[in-house]
Amino acid sequence: ETGVTQTPRHLVMGMTNKKSLKCEQHLGHNAMYWYKQSAKKPLELMFVYNFKEQTENNSVPSRFSPECPNSSHLFLHLHTLQPEDSALYLCASSQDEYPGTSGYEQYFGPGTRLTVT
Amino acid sequence: AQSVAQPEDQVNVAEGNPLTVKCTYSVSGNPYLFWYVQYPNRGLQFLLKYITGDNLVKGSYGFEAEFNKSQTSFHLKKPSALVSDSALYFCAVRGTNSGGYQKVTFGTGTKLQVIP
């Protein structure tokens, strides 16, 4: 295992539901990330947090709302999603995140397979 | 804007034969380059990275990659493929232009199929 856990592993939700994805890292890292992985498309970076501060919001729709209460936990709150939001959502962590200079690799969780009906 | 190209959607290789998974990149400044592997129903797993120094980088599970600045390539290689190497492989790049935020950019992935 990579030291990054994600719950739930699978989630089916209707377009009017509200749900949250949870990520926890046990590696002592200071940076955490949310990615969206869809079939036949590159991995899409959604959000970056460094020392609990959001440093990147990659033009993500407001129906996705991240929360990082501390360096070990990251949430993705979901509401009024669309069917095209169905994908694998991956959480990752790394040592830290300094713009343009961080060469640290990322450690990924197993992902949450989200299906929006 | 930085980019990564993995020109092959799938690579098939016989078990025991050498394998190569190709990656080329475009980035401002010097690149940080990474390879990750993804097994079914799992997240990405770090294999190796190039930051500076030796152009040949060795990583996990016998994999290595060669950084070629003139060809802007970072191909992943292994001398002898195993069936258990069958997975999805991602190349990633990050620029080192300290003038602004440089996120990591991933390629679209190459599926490696090792045939027994």
Image (tube, helix red, strand yellow):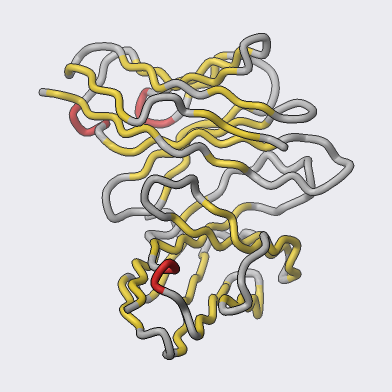
- Identify the image quadrant of residue B38: top left
Q: How many marks?
A: 0
Residue positioned most to the top? B70
Q: Quadrant of the C terminus of chain A?
A: bottom left
Q: Name the residue: 39% across, 63% down.
A: A87
User: Looking at the image, which residue sits at the far right?
Assistant: B99
| Residue at the image position 57 percent from the left and 74 percent from the top | A73
Would residue A108 be found to the left or right of residue A70 on screen? Answer: left
- Residue A39 lies, in percent from the top left, at 36, 51
Above or below for A46 versus B102: below
Is A49 left or right of B48, judged from the image as shown? right
Give the residue drawn at x 18%, y 29%: B83
| Residue B32: quarter of image | top right
Q: Nearer the viewer, residue B29 or B82?
A: B29
Q: Is residue B75 above or below residue B2?
A: above
Q: Residue A61, image x and y in percent?
A: 61, 71
Relative image position of residue B57 (x, y in whole percent): 54, 20
Image location of residue B5, percent across then percent down: 52, 29
Q: Is residue A61 above or below residue B36?
A: below
View extreme (left): residue: B116
At x 86%, y 40%, the residue is B98
